Image (cartoon, grey):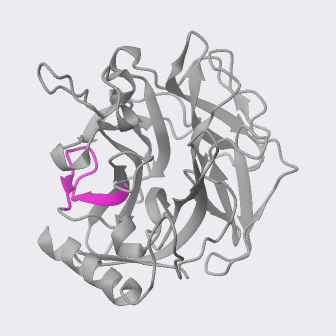
Amino acid sequence: MHSITLVTVLIFGIVIGSTEAQYNGTYSTIQPVLAEDFADPSLVNVNGTWFAFATSGNGHNIQVAASPSFTTHEWRLLNETNVLPDPGPWALNKDIWAPDVVQLEDGRWVMYYAAPLVDNKDMHCIGAATSTSIVGPYEPQKDPFACPKEDGGAIDASGFVDPKSGNLYVVYKVDGNSINAHGGDCNGNPDPSNGYLHPTPIMLQQVSKADGITKMGDPVQLLDRGEADGPLVEAPSLFYNSESGLYFLTFSSNCYATDLYDIGFAYSSCLDTEFVKSKYPLMTTQSIGVSAPGGADMSDDGKYALYHATVDKTENGSPIRYMYAAEADQAGLDVSAIPLV
């Protein structure tokens, strides 16, 4: 475990160590690939064109951007595209979070997203919608895909096709911190009587390859937050490295509204079992010089990543998050990621 994370930290130190960067006042040499409020980006490549989907903003429930190349700063918003006009009868038509898309065997696309409930605006659950075009419009299912209300709802769904088995999975977060009752960043203050915080497990659900929605068996827990993770772990993304034979899971921990928010990773030789967390995070505010990096999504081959970082705040204190990119590499148990500048 130490060899994975130590290599990562050292590579970041070599690449980023000479930059002059900190939040709230000075500048970073790491530049966003999309200078728009574009949080929780997910990525997919279609015939050489890269697409990124993001949380609500710029007048749309779901944002989408495209680029002819991952490694150049050519991303542009597709403002004319209304990807998800209606999130479904169970959901409020606002505050749609963290979309992700997967192509099905018949060429159709399925989108997973989180939306607030009609009967509880403070709780999000995961919905699913389908389209014949990657940019929509997507038609929502009438019921949520995953909605464990008693545990806080569910968010941050991400599709994953296992290259070993060909099976389709959805990995997501049970949003337990949404029902913590004691305030703080991301409801992160523990119960003063017993120190209790609700779990925020990362779950894996196999689904039908035909429709991407029908569940196959029960979900399996891959990991949960520990003491070092603060109130939560979230934003899971899976990929498989054929050379090492390992599955890797990237995730964020701590609260998105603070500089403690980061990107970590875990690994396992089996997909449907508890993953082993790396001791050290992959990206932090201190290691790469941008504030609160998080919400990362990996390409299917694990070579590329999109993530967001906070660049400013709105008048009401909400973070404004631009999209950044990194190239990643795995060699045995060694994992590295180098931000594009």
Left or right of 97 on screen, residue 168: left
Q: Could you tell me if residue 181 is visible in this image?
A: yes
Q: Could you tell me if residue 205 is visible in this image?
A: no
205 is within the stretch colored magenta = no
**Most foreground residue, 222 or 92:** 92
Estimate the x, y position of residue 6 in percent, counting from the top left. 19, 77
Residue at (21% x, 44% y) in the render? 273
The magenta-colored residue range is 262-278
- Name above or below for residue 21 compared with residue 183: below
Residue at (52% x, 69% y) in the render? 25
275 is within the stretch colored magenta = yes
Residue at (21% x, 59% y) in the render? 269
- Name above or below for residue 311 compared with residue 99: below
Residue at (58% x, 57% y) in the render? 312
Specify the quadrant of the image occupied by residue 86.
top right
Left or right of 118 on screen, residue 266: left
| Image quadrant where one finds the C terminus | bottom right
Left or right of 230 on screen, residue 155: right
Estimate the x, y position of residue 41 in percent, counting from the top left. 58, 54
**Most foreground residue, 126 or 226:** 226
Estimate the x, y position of residue 201 in percent, counting from the top left. 29, 36
| Image quadrant where one finds the N terminus | bottom left
**Residue reaching furthest to the front:** 25
**Most foreground residue, 11 or 274:** 11
**Residue reaching furthest to the right:** 80
Q: How many marks?
A: 0
Estimate the x, y position of residue 331 in percent, counting from the top left. 28, 81
Left or right of 50 on screen, residue 328: left
